[in-house]
Image (tube, grey):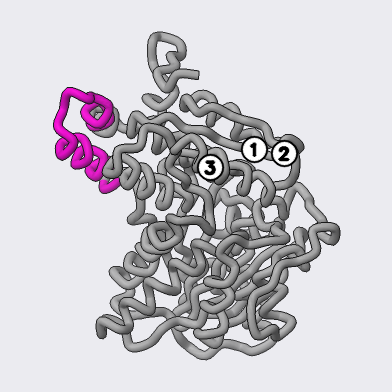
Amino acid sequence: MSNQLRLLNDVSYVDTLMSKETIKLSNVVKDTNQSSVDRISAFEDIINIEVGDTSLSRARNIEREIDLRQIYLKFEGGNPSGTHKDRIAFAQCLDALRRGFNTVAVATCGNYGVSMALASNLAGLRCMIYIPENYHTKRFEEMENLGATIIRVKGNYEHTVMFSRKKAKKNEYYDTNPGGQNTTLQLQAYGEIAFEIYDVMRDAPKIVAAPVSNGTMLAGVYRGFVSLFKRGKTSRIPRIVAASTNKNNPIVNSVLHHQKKYSNLNPALINETIINEPLINWKSFDGTEAFNAVKNSNGYAFGISDHKMVNISKMLKTKEGLNVLPASTAGLAALFEIHKKEPFEGDRYVAILTGKK
């Protein structure tokens, strides 16, 4: 399907999502008569306008609820497609433009596919999205409306990633899959979250808690804080909390079982639900990076039940006015659990919320 898909009144789907300024810049990026310098510069401007600089707000009502002061929420739902995935999607499309690719490829079960479809649409790149044949998400229609081509693949998510990688290599597509050749770029893009937290706090918080699936975002945030500390910007590196679905994520499992290094789970033991689907993995593609982030920061790992994630999602809506996916609350839930067992001293604590409903 063409990325020039038109809707009623000759308005494209992407036009309904983006500002007029962004659409104007996108037209420059797509114009091959423009110089490569101007096209790349225009896409950089799109990133500066649309991606990152998400809100970091103090959750005073939740503080009163659990009797802990200075809880801050880093809400990634402010990104254009509503999740933190936009950070790596736009960064990789920029890299693809610089390197002369015309097609990007990714395996996904939902959010990442929408991010890649949106970023590639604005960049004028073809987007190939590989999805496990048994997965269903309301976001498929968004991907198609944004001009992406969807290919169903037999097997689970992990198999689909490997299939997508092979197709990318064979057809010379730009491979945006996790755990591949662009891991460093992905970690750098997520490191911006740490820099944004520092910009507000002017130091590192005591703890940063985040949900994990593949572990890329959490590992990138940790690297960002390590960079800030080494440059003398912060007085410390925060303790990292990895939170995920109960007994269904290998990063959390490896930490909780006091293993010396990250290891995969048995695929047959994975139990998927509607709530935990964004968090489950038997193989986290950046699991080693995330495991090391937790261990090196003297951090924590927690498995959170579906029930707790749903309840905290409701709490965020009623107490702080935020609509978030239950799975997105895993990090905040883990923060609460740690505080129950080991009451925190007065300090600053950050929970990253990775998406919205």
Marks 3 and 1, how far apart at CA? 9 Å
Q: Is residue 111 visible?
A: no
Residue at which label 2 appears: 135
Q: Position of residue 109 (x, y in %)?
A: 64, 43
Q: Earlier in the sequence, mark 3 or mark 2?
A: 3
Expressed as whole percent of the image width and height from the top left, the position of residue 279 reads 66, 57
Indicate the position of residue 61 as horizontal and vertical percent values.
53, 66
Q: Which residues are magenta?
A: 25-48
Discs 3/2, front? 3
Please state the horizontal and vertical placement of residue 197, each as a whole percent of the image: 36, 69
**Is residue 200 covered in magenta?**
no
Q: Quadrant of residue 49?
A: top left
Which residue lies at the image location 32% right of the left edge and 72% below the top edge?
198
Residue type (three-letter) at the residue carrying disc 1: Ile
The answer to whether 11 is drawn above or below residue 347 in the figure is above
What is the number of callouts on the image?
Answer: 3
Label 1 sits on residue: 131
